[in-house]
Image (tube, grey):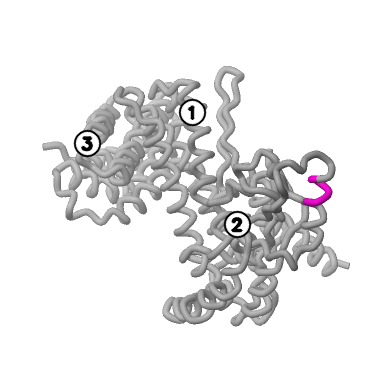
Amino acid sequence: MVIETSTLVSGSICWNYEERGKIFSLKHRFFHKCSAPLEYCKQKGLSDNIIITKTVEDEAKNALNRAVERTIKDNAKPSLVSRYGLMVLQHIVLNEALDRLEYYVEECSIRLPINRDERDKVKTNEIEPFLQGIAKNTLRYIQPSIPGFIRGPFRDELIERIVESLPSKGVIYKGMPSDRDLTIMAEAAMIHKRLKEKVYVASVDNHFKPNPVQIGSFLDPSMHYTGEVDSTIRDRLAEKFGFIGEDPQRVLEIIKKGYETKLE
Amino acid sequence: MRSYSQEIAKIEKMLEGFVESSKIDANQLSLMDNVIKWSEEDQIKVLNNSYLALDVQRLFFGAIRNVNVSMKSMKEKLKGAATRRENPGTAELALELMPSFSNLASYVDLFIGKKGSEIKLDNVTKFSRILYKKAKSYGFYQDVASQLKEAGVTDSQIESFIDSFSRNIAQELDIEEEVSSTVESGN
């Protein structure tokens, strides 16, 4: 399993502080599901199956640093006392997050050598053009073109029908991934080539994992998810490059199943 | 001109003396006061330097703070050990930490001496983290509650930081939109 940046960052943010009975908690909403596969593998002696590449580690640290800097800017006040307090706070919180992140890197995972030239070639010549080809005709969400005067149960039923007709109505995908994501995909592809076995990429980013089917835009008050996921792009990437993007919770289930089967 | 490296060399010598004589002399611990005082002042100086980019400001604030918090905590631990007339186990641990102080001190000296352009920032990050991690594992790092109390951090400041940081992390990872679609809601 390859850990992707979003998983490493989300699994690193868990800071709790109690003062006079008041509890302050800074825990990423995905903390549990992102830390669980790493902790499980460590506990069961399976950490050799987890890979955190240098790119992912660096990117995760950069993401934490950038978020901290934005937070400082958001909370900046002219008073020196306030600025000092803010700097002390960020220093404490960032160090805690980095402690956890480094624990995952050093104690819960391994690293394979990656030839950077080869990786960049895979990224530029294979992953990027492939994704450009398949991602251009995708949708971020379904916006049923139903006239505004149709309301109530009939509208809902119409929406349901449209959704049912997927994927012929379109493929749901987040859009072209960033350069950083493409690099991680190239690394996962190379790891698959080297190991010659299934490689899961544990990610909470929709560029990697199956995308939830969303109805309506984020600005639409009736925006909702159907509960289904569209794995079209993920599957095509898996078929072509051998890495399977999946939600960390699902990856944990797969690992557990594999481990239990092995024991039987 | 102040030199952290020189002061740390003096402290190292003092600790060697403790280990050799198997006794911690509390009267000598004031030798650590210069580093503690300077690092308190220099944290503020870094904050007041508006010419510094935020990342550089954070880097040196953190480095100087790690020196301050570890040295202060180390002094307290040594003082406690002297009072209890413990064998110099605490001094031995403190001595082990000195190379980490020295490595970082040389960069802090360059920075304070306005020779910032000669500094490799990655090295400061690396040595600052090493000092923090070692000091923490040896029990020479002030606990969070005391740090926040000393710094006068208020509840509302913490709450505002948490809100803002959570938002910025979501934005950074670009997964904000997926909140309600996930299998697990977290906490």
* Chain letter for mark 3: B
Above/below status of A220 relative to A256? above
Q: Amino acid at mark 3?
A: Ser
Determine whether the residue tagged by mark 2 lies in a helix, strand or loop: loop
Q: Which residues are magenta?
A: A155-159
Q: Amino acid at mark 1?
A: Ser
User: Which residue lies most toward the right here?
Assistant: A264
Above/below status of A10 relative to A162? above
Q: What residue does disc 2 label? A: A205
Q: In the depicted view, which residue is nearer to us: A198 or A39?
A: A198
Q: Are marks 2 and 1 on the same chain?
A: no
The residue located at (67%, 57%) in the rendering is A42
Q: What residue does disc 3 label? A: B50
Above/below status of B22 relative to A34? above
The residue located at (40%, 48%) in the rendering is B129
Q: Picture coordinates of residue A215 (x, y %)?
A: 70, 50
Q: Picture coordinates of residue A207 (x, y %)?
A: 59, 62
Query: Number of callouts in the render?
Result: 3
Q: In the depicted view, which residue is nearer to us: A21 or B165?
A: B165
Q: Residues within 10 Å of mark 2 (few under 14, many from 20)?
A: many
Q: Amino acid at mark 2?
A: Asp
Q: What residue does disc 1 label? A: B160
* Chain letter for mark 2: A
Determine whether the residue tagged by mark 1 lies in a helix, strand or loop: helix
